[in-house]
Image (cartoon, rainbow, N blue to C red):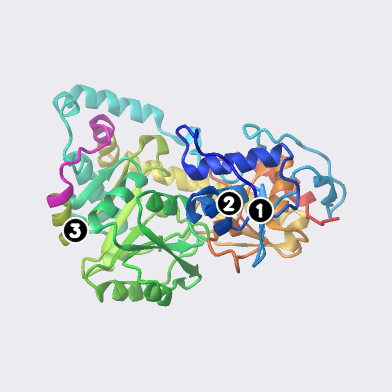
Amino acid sequence: MLTYSFNNIGSDSLYNYLYKCIRDDILAGKLKSGEKLPSKRTFAKNLGISVITVENAYEQLSAEGYIYSIAKKGFYVADMKNLSGIKPVFGHTEDINTSTDPGKYIADFTSNKVNKDLFPFSVWSKLIREVLRDNQELILAAPSYKGTEELRSAISDYLRDFKGIKADPDHIIIGAGSENLYGQIVQLLGHDKIYGVEDPGYQKTSAVYEANGVRLARIPFDRAGINIEKLLSEGVNVAHISPSHQFPTGIVTPISKRYELLGWASKEEDRYIIEDDYDSEFRLTGHPIPSLFSIDTTGKVIYMNTFSKSLSPSLRVSFMVLPDKLMARYKENLSFYTCPVTSMIQLTLARFILEGYFEKHLNRMRNFYKRQRDTLIRLISESKMSELVSISEEDAGLHFLISFNELDCTDSEFKALLLKKGIKIYALSDFYYDKSNPTEHTFVLNYSSLTEDELTKAVAILDRITCKPK
């Protein structure tokens, strides 16, 4: 039985340490191609750790192409050396790049990095100087537990004017990134609640909830939205969803399902919906989708958003809007916290919004990303593989899905081959917790951080490659 010692893991989490141990053994050849890994339950028992820890390690290894899964059989080590057995369909394969150095990708379709040319450095530096000149006392004072009044008021105005959300500034809580706010929500609603997350979904959300010690239920998500019957059968109290742009599918939850969700929440006192409005600012076609919060009449929706995609993740500014009852509970139980975002950043961001720079910045970014998307779709449509692929959810945000109709290999094999050629990509199947029936041969193309030259080279490589095992 495969085994590892956890006596000296340093600052690593258990799952990350286990992931590194298995990864290193695969790269060193100690674990051979095709070798079956222990079942999650057996492995966890042997190592004296939780099944969830093993699960998270296997998911990360699978996402990076080190292992792959076979439904109802288990996990197996991917072929990391004999990639020559995967043959192209079109023409011949010139090696544009054979480097697997993670810092030298031709194109990284998994990156959420913001393009540095889009950040308004000159405006930001001007506003910082103004804040230093005009707000010296506020900068040196500890901010309210909710955040500065200036930023909360600016966010309230923005939500009203551009999203149709009526949010009282006193009900807005500023946090240092969404993860920080997830933890506060668990403390607010209770560790004894069952939290439902979408499957497929953003794995980091699940990891944060698990780190907070709550019970998770993975709820199937499809074109009709999250499965209400599964919410009921799993006894979910809190549903964490992204109705305006689900990741990774890009699907927008239909309005009928939105009202059904509100009905589900209203039937029990301890039921709530966390509406994660992740990157909804970048819907590239049509009008913004009305938020759940804006149509909620029973005080059951917690609205969340972040400036990570619209400005920069390094700012670490997110916020949530609490309904009346929860705001009163927050004030009573959690107001001892100090807002973790510096007053300097908050006051600068407030001016950026109130003086109209944020609106101009978003318009500029939307135009840029629309050009990026259109360029990528055009390159694909002009390629030989155009007849073998289909594109979906291209209007919803900063990524879309590409499905290969004729791909004679596993998702893991395809990702490994692309990685050898200098392209990093996620498969949609990587984001499923329930591996029994994931969507195969569909991949997520996040184009937000790529240049036109990188997109051109990436499509040229994709055009040459369709996998066929020996």
Q: Of marks 1 and 3, which one's residue comes earlier in the chain?
A: 1
Marks 2/3: CA–CA distance? 37 Å
As measured in the structure, the alpha-carbon distance from the residue carrying label 1 to the one carrying label 3 is 45 Å
Q: Residue 298, how many percent across, how many down?
A: 21, 70
Task: Describe the element under mark 2 as helix, strand or loop.
Answer: helix
Mark 1 or mark 3, whichever is nearer to me: 1
Q: Nearer the viewer, mark 2 or mark 3?
A: 2
Instruction: Name the secondary structure under disc 1.
Output: loop
User: Residue at the location (37% across, 56% down)?
Assistant: 276
Q: Nearer the viewer, residue 205 or 169?
A: 205
Which residue is disc 3 drawn over? Answer: 326
Residue hosting label 1: 37
Question: Is 340 a magenta residue?
Answer: yes
> Residue 413's spot in the image, x, y percent?
73, 52
Foreground disc of the pair 2, 1: 1
Mark 2 touches mark 3? (CB < 8 Å): no
Kind of residue at badge 1: Leu
| Residue 306, horizontal then vertical, whole percent | 35, 47
Q: Nearer the viewer, residue 373 or 60?
A: 60
Q: Which residues are magenta?
A: 332-348
Task: Give the residue type that dot 3 points to.
Answer: Leu
Please tell me which residue lies in front, 68 or 286.
68
Q: Quadrant of the C terminus?
A: bottom right
Tag shown at residue 58? 2
The kind of residue on which mark 2 rests is Tyr
Circles 2 and 1, Cβ within 8 Å, touching? The answer is yes
Crowdedness of circle 1 by 10 Å Cα count: few (<14), some, many (20+)?
Answer: some
Against 206, residue 125 (above or below) is above
